[in-house]
Image (cartoon, rainbow, N blue to C red):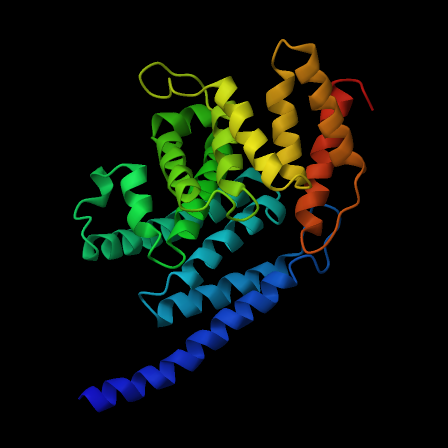
Amino acid sequence: MRKLSAALLLLVAPSLVAQTSEGDRLWNLRAEGSRGGRAAAGPIEGAIAAFARAAAQSPNDLEARSKLLRAYRFKGAYVASTSEQKKQVYDEAKKAGAGAVALVEKQLAARGLKTPAKASAKQIAEIARSIPHAGEIYLWDAVNWGEWALAYGKMAAARQGAADRIHRGATVAQIIDPRMEGGTPSRVLGRLHDQTPRIPFITGWASEREAVRFLTESNKIDPKNKITMVFLAEALVSGSSPDAKKKAVDLARAAASAPNEPPFVVEQAAAQADAEVLLKKWELR
């Protein structure tokens, strides 16, 4: 029986590697056929299918699942063009994220954290560091919950606990590695503080000061990331300080004028367009 199991594993493993590699190949082609900040559906849908197959073939594989969640976010943000399309994508992403987080929590329990759902973000992160790709799972699950909240409405999402889920996942990821994905954990936390409605007893922790602090941290890690630049500009301009407003304008102008470079052509082009909208809104083009 053991020899048979080993033989089956040898058959499955190459297929798993092949599917993940195919997903990576298509992910790297995600800008092909794009127009500005809008991506063609083909490459990213192919990547999603390949990562989903890899995850199905290996129930305990976290790498494929983390990449699947990342691919869902890209599709929802840069391919889906209507509210209904975005809702459909992020509903799927939430479902995939729930399964991925449950798998991480199972591994956490096996390492001694018996009730991960009741543990603090710090307790989770300390053990999750030993689990490859667990940090990415928490990060992209948080990102997709944020996008889901935007698709369904921030107030409704806040009342359903979306803000706490995003905050917890991004905090775990930040504790594990603040430089993950170019400072994405801090960017998520900063955007969350900036965009979350202040609802007493529900999201009273949301803070404009914390929004600027986290987004500044993310910007220091990757100063050329246009998404962070735009988010930081929005957070700064709401303050009363003339210096903060000047920095906001400078960031928006830099994001609007800097060239878009691979492999993030689509993401940067979309952020560039957002920066141009801000400057027009501020009548500073």
Q: Quadrant of the N terminus?
A: bottom left
Residue that appears at 48% across and 29% down = 192
Res 66 → quadrant: bottom left
Q: Is residue 89 above or below residue 192?
A: below
Would you say 120 lies left or right of 56 here?
Answer: left
Residue that appears at 53% across and 36% down = 187
Question: How many numbered tags mark residues here?
Answer: 0
Residue that appears at 43% across and 64% down = 52
Image spot of residue 54 (x, y percent): 42, 69
Res 237 → quadrant: top right
Q: Nearer the viewer, residue 92 or 271?
A: 271
Image spot of residue 226 (x, y percent): 68, 39
Q: Nearer the viewer, residue 49 or 274?
A: 274
- Whether residue 277 appears in this view of the structure is no
Would you say 98 lies left or right of 78 here?
Answer: left
Q: Is residue 113 above or below residue 62?
A: above
Image spot of residue 252 (x, y percent): 73, 29
